[in-house]
Image: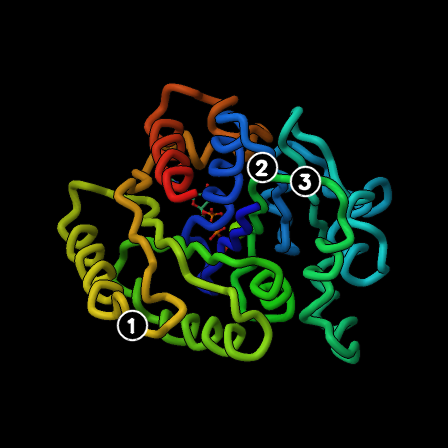
Amino acid sequence: MRSIAIMNQKGGVGKTTTSVNLSAALAMSGKRVLLIDMDPQAHATLHLGVNADSETQNSIYDVLVDDVSLASAKTPINGNFDLVSADLDLAAAEMELSGVVGRELILRDKLKEDNASYDYLIIDCPPSLGVLTLNALVAVKEAFIPMQPHFLALHGLSKLLETIQLINKRLNPKLRVSGVVMCMYDGNARLTSEVTGDVEEFFRVQHGGATPWANAQIFKTHIRKNVRLAEAPSFGKDIFTYDPKCAGAIDYLALAEEVMNNE
Ligand code: ATP
Ligand code: MG
């Protein structure tokens, strides 16, 4: 199984849009996919039209804090695509877990206990480097970093990579940054191509080194700015159900192809 955390502590760069639509594209290609929503905002949950209501449905909060099984928190999206939902309670998890020994390891252990088998585990991380993102990074082998090509794109990247390196050293030696996705790409804007060039150069000069991001692939597929991608969540649909012919659908399908080529 490939296990991928979609992470960037910067807000609004395309983490959730990528988590949901990449998961959906992989599932459409016949892969068995488990998507875990690790964000208290529950955007991935809502994007897939699942009710983020703590009264009726176990969520990742119950898995992390109340020790329920992952299986009991899954909602089937379709035959080979399951979601572990989030809800607002998750915002309290950080505090509630603060005194718990080994709190970064809970999700990893829960995944080990889970009997279902998947080809892909995708985790949508919140925009922070707190205990929720740490749980994700301890539980996976790969991190994908979505980036929005504006002038502060590289700002904060060193903090992110420092975190990855620490987790790699202390908690999860298998963790690698394996992909960088440029999201909300505007091919007509000069700034977009300049920043994309800077990002490529940043990773190129470190290629082949000893860092966990030394072999990061900057995906050739750029996710173009496409209003359909911004509309789909409010209908509770992934992009392929909402508008299968739009640029956003084409781009996320192409991204999934690139991801699967590296299997
Ligand atoms: P957060 O840090 O709050 O979790 P995020 O990194 O998950 O944010 P998204 O929610 O995926 O980012 O995207 C931010 C906003 O931009 C959303 O309203 C989303 O619908 C929109 N968006 C994402 N990708 C695109 C795109 N390629 N074209 C147009 N709009 C997009
Ligand atoms: Mg998000």
- Residue highlighted by disc 1: 209
- Residue highlighted by disc 2: 47
Residue drawn at the location 47% of the way across and 38% of the way down: 22
Q: Nearer the viewer, residue 106 or 1?
A: 1
Image side of residue 56 versus residue 108, left or right:
right
SS label for mark 2: helix
Residue drawn at the location 52% of the way across and 22% of the way down: 241
SS label for mark 1: loop
Q: Position of residue 136 (x, y in %)?
A: 60, 60
Image side of residue 156 versus residue 218, left or right:
right
Q: Position of residue 48 (x, y in %)?
A: 61, 34
Image side of residue 215 versus residue 165, left or right:
left
Looking at the image, is mark 1 or mark 2 earlier in the sequence?
A: 2
Q: Nearer the viewer, residue 253 or 110?
A: 110
Q: Quadrant of residue 215?
A: bottom left
Residue drawn at the location 58% of the way across and 64% of the way down: 133
Label 3, residues with CA under 10 Å away: few <14, some 14-19, many ≥20: few
- The amino acid at mark 3 is Ser
Task: Please tell me whether mark 3 or mark 2 is closer to you in this view.
Answer: 3
Image coloring type:
rainbow
Looking at the image, is mark 3 or mark 2 earlier in the sequence?
A: 2
- The amino acid at mark 2 is His
For the C terminus, which image quadrant? top left
Task: Please tell me whether mark 1 or mark 2 is closer to you in this view.
Answer: 1
Separation of marks 1 and 2 at Cα, in angstroms: 38 Å
Separation of marks 3 and 1 at Cα, in angstroms: 33 Å
Q: Quadrant of residue 81?
A: top right
- The amino acid at mark 1 is Gly
Separation of marks 3 and 2 at Cα, in angstroms: 24 Å
Instruction: Reply above or below: 167 against 12.
Output: below
Image mark count: 3
